[in-house]
Image (cartoon, rainbow, N blue to C red):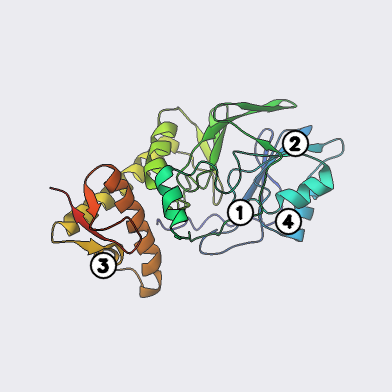
Amino acid sequence: MTLPPDDFNPHVGKAIDLSPGVRRIVAPNPSPMTYRGTNTYLVGTGDIAVIDPGPESEAHLEAILAALAPGQRISHIVVTHSHLDHSPLAAPLKARTGAPVLAFGGPEAGRSPVMQDLAAAGLAGGGEGIDHAFAPDRTLSDGETIEGDGWALEVIHTPGHLGNHIALGMGDACFTADHVMGWATSLVSPPDGDLTDFMASCRRLRARDWSVFHPGHGAPVDTPAARLDWLIAHRLSREDSILATLADGPATARTLAERIYTETPPALIPAAERNVFAHLVDLMGKSLVSPQDRLAATAVFERIA
């Protein structure tokens, strides 16, 4: 995790112009996982697309509605993924506006087969929490375009943080939600998060020429390519550390986390352990490590020579 920029102190609940036809409202849900709060975006000048309405919050619902100028209406509600800090307000906003809710799918959509197996075996995710009640009115497909009055959003399926996670391209800008942020690295916690998918999604975004990323939390990322390069290198460095530690002998994700995250407070070791486990699943897919028994969060892993 990188240190958050001290200059991002938004006026929570106030719509701020970011570029022509793009405004941001920060929700009142600050936390160690959400930074200053969830970013809700309003796209358009007539018919408005709301990207990530945010958490269950009457105050935030009223802030979104108050941002509408005379003659404007909300025509689309687009949810990038179904974590509790992004999707729960979609249903109340739909009830107030009549706008349909669009997303890649429900909470388990886009989950890879290995993560399906881990979930079936009883592994539960962590982090922001899943909005299990979330169900879109219309399911989006990778590559399709959502169009409105004077705007168009390209759907880019970016699983990794969550299987149903999407980014939304608008010209050379991209709404990256929780996949790429400037203030922190994205949480990847199996079975909801999948590091193999996360890295593939990073490389997919890196293949495009973007001018700015509008993330789910924090300030705009003005150097998208450099940020993606850093995220990819950071994950590869963590992979090297895990492989180097396993060279000393088999170990569990917990043991590896304690040996690698030596400066991490004890209270954060469980989160580090889940991060290490995400890497171990990815490394197993690359045939670089193997569990001594079946794949599980508590398994003992060994390096494959």
Q: Reading the chain from its start, which is encountered first: label 2 or label 3? A: 2
Question: How far apart are the alpha carbons under marks 4 and 3?
Answer: 42 Å
User: Would you name the residue on which mark 3 appears?
Assistant: 255
User: Would you name the residue on which mark 4 appears?
Assistant: 60
Decide if residue 89 is on the left or right side of residue 280: right
Residue type at the position of mark 3: Thr
Residue type at the position of mark 4: His
The reply to whether residue 72 is visible in this rendering is yes
Residue depth check, mark 2 versus mark 3: number of the one nearer the observer? 3
Question: How far apart are the alpha carbons under marks 1 and 3?
Answer: 33 Å
Q: Badge 1 local density, few (<14 within 10 Å), some, or many (20+)?
A: many
Q: Residue at x 44, y 33 (%)?
A: 205
Q: Which residue in the rendered view is the most extreme toward the bottom?
A: 266
Q: Reading the chain from its start, which is encountered first: label 1 or label 4? A: 1
The reply to whether discs 1 and 4 touch (Cβ–Cβ < 8 Å) is no
Residue type at the position of mark 2: Ile
Residue depth check, mark 1 versus mark 3: number of the one nearer the observer? 3
Q: Residue at x 26, y 58 (%)?
A: 293
Closer to the camera in the image, 35 or 254 = 254
User: Would you name the residue on which mark 2 appears?
Assistant: 48
The reply to whether discs 4 and 3 touch (Cβ–Cβ < 8 Å) is no
Q: Secondary structure at mark 4?
A: helix
The reply to whether discs 1 and 3 touch (Cβ–Cβ < 8 Å) is no
Query: Where is the N terminus found, in terms of image quarters?
Result: bottom left
User: Would you name the residue on which mark 1 appears?
Assistant: 38
| Residue 211: percent from left, percent from top | 50, 32
